[in-house]
Amino acid sequence: MTEVTSDEVKESLRAAVPTQTIGGTNIAAGIYECQRILAQYTGGDIKNTRILLHSDGEGTVDNSIEQIISEGVILDTVLFGQGGFLADRAGETGGQQYFASDERGGVGLLAFYESTALRTCEAENEDALLNNDLILIIAGELTYQGRVYFDVTIGLNTKMVFQYDARVEISISTNLQVTLSEDVISLTTIVTIEGQLEQFLDYTITKEDPDTEVSVILTVTSSPVPGIQPIVVNNRLNSNNIDFSASSELIGYMGVFQGYSPVLQLAVFTVLEDPSGSLTRIQYYDDGTGKDSVANDGIYTGFLPPHLIGGGSSGKFYGLSIDIQGEGLLPGLGVVGRRKKRCVGCNSLGNVTRSGSGGVIVIDNWVQLNDTTPPEKITDLTVLAVSEDNGKVTLAWTAPGEDLNMGRVSGYEFGVGAEVSIDAMINLASELILSDVSTFLVEAGSPLEMQVNAGAITPAMIGLPESANISTYYFRIRTYDSSNNYANWSNPVSASYVDPAVIAVLYGPTTTTTNQPTEITTKTSSLTIILICVGLGGFLALAVGLAMCLYSFNSKSKLKDRRSYRQASPHVTFYGSAYNNDHYYSMPQEPFSFQHDHRRGNHQVFNNAVYY
């Protein structure tokens, strides 16, 4: 072994590295030598030590892997070629693996090296890899200004490593003690910052020659703050080995927790690098859409359908990297809103950033497949409003994606009918749609609204005779993608008008109604006079008798009016798990509104909308 004690020794070792491959590799001999050195430094106990193996995967291993497994040694592997089998063997030892392509290997390698070096047996003692970025400073630009964010759990004794392909100058903006160490041979600058950083740190990269293009790889690590539980990220896939077929989707799960509390509202991504170096960015969601089973449980889920898995028949190793960013929130009173939700009463952890290697997947028998993944079904279609003067209905929903909850759809279909059944609906005529449908072709998760001229719908437009008396109309929506894969129809909603007099008879006057029937006031005054004139016993008997008579009269009246209401006064109904038994009423002229709960038998007045 040669100890590196100077730049001259480092350069001599660099020159000794062969630039061409000749023959095979005795991987087993290298592993056995590593075991010997580890035993020398640890006194013989090499359990939980780590070997980092770089190879193209081709060569002989004998029983070396089995031997290090039996001794508790962890093997991390970096693969530089498409042959071999070491990706599987690293997992057997509890290690990680990385595939380094020629196009982008440097960025991922630094992240993998940091991940290997930082990993300990206890997550709360691990330093965090915050950033692993490729920065391109184009010709004509002299400087690049960047910022590194720190959440409340991290920021102690931070290290920044800059690697570049042309000489640059690094400056850091902080009042803490900063040490810069530059290696002019490897074109690397290491910055260490002692003490506790809070919220963010600014830095500047300055080129020597503004007319050149410079690439900089920045890796940032930081230690956890004592006494505060760290944010822990756990990443796993549905499979690391995929024998390619039409059902060969890649599903990833990313758990982000502080202790037992999920960290919410983050932007979580995995970057898949195929054998050619092409990158596919996969977003993970924790909102119950797509492949995510439960919203806001701290487990973010992403997927890549088979038609989006690129590469080619000659390659099979794919590298993965992790990118997490955004303000992290701990659960509070709850999460409200549609898919893009806001957290009520949640505690902020600050801007959370995490990077790292996501491992390697192996794909065999790759072929280019057609797109068979439809957009996601819309499940939150609602009626926001019904205009009382012209019959305009405002519908609202959350945009689905090209592939479930990813991307943007290519088109919409709108169904309308006099019945809730899909079979009873026909396509809504374009002239009845008062919104620009092209504005609905947006990224998945965007909130959308549309106005429909429901007042202009005739029975003939929905396939019924003109003589039909229809006043309630049901709506559904579905989308399709660029390959004409259609989503299922959305949950149904319905819209219609209600005569205010009917509501007044059924549920009595509300605080927003000022004109009360004269006869009610008269009866109340007569009853008051009678009560004054009778004795206590007569008062009780009379009160019970009158109450029974009034109850019987009101029950019959309400039953009669309810039957008329069902026949002549249609309503707006919200369907689906979030809106069961909710009704929206819009009344002409001067509508009043109230809330009535069937189960509790009470109601509440509020502005221009009725939910019961």
Image (cartoon, rainbow, N blue to C red):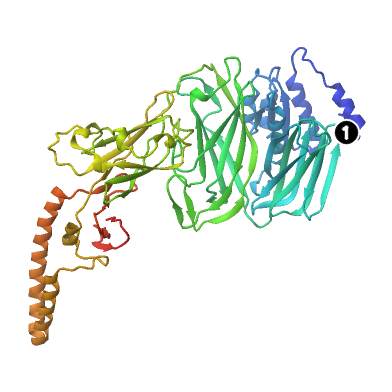
The residue positioned 29% from the left and 50% from the top of the image is 387
Quadrant in the rendering for residue 353 = top right
Q: Which quarter of the figure is the C terminus placed in? A: bottom left
Judge whether 551 appears above or below 342 on screen. Answer: below
Q: Could you tell whether 577 is left or right of 19 in the image?
A: left
The residue positioned 24% from the left and 33% from the top of the image is 425
Between 127 and 208, the residue placed more toward the observer is 208
Q: Which quarter of the figure is the N terminus placed in? A: top right
Between 155 and 86, the residue placed more toward the observer is 155
Between 160 and 511, the residue placed more toward the observer is 511
Judge whether 262 appears above or below 69 on screen. Answer: below
Residue 134 drawn at (x, y percent): 70, 34
Quadrant in the rendering for residue 128 = top right
Name the amino acid type tagged 1: Val
Residue 550 drawn at (x, y percent): 10, 69
Q: Residue furthest top?
A: 23
Residue 138 visible here: yes
Q: Could you tell whether 251 is left or right of 189 in the image?
A: left
Q: Residues within 10 Å of mark 1 (few under 14, many from 20)?
A: few
Quadrant in the rendering for residue 533 = bottom left
Q: Which residue is mark 1?
A: 4
Residue 88 visible here: no
The residue positioned 90% from the left and 35% from the top of the image is 5
Residue 380 drawn at (x, y percent): 37, 43
Judge whether 95 appears above or below 203 on screen. Answer: above
Residue 611 drawn at (x, y percent): 29, 55
The residue positioned 79% from the left and 55% from the top of the image is 176
Q: Dot 1 lies on which element?
A: loop
Number of marks in picture: 1
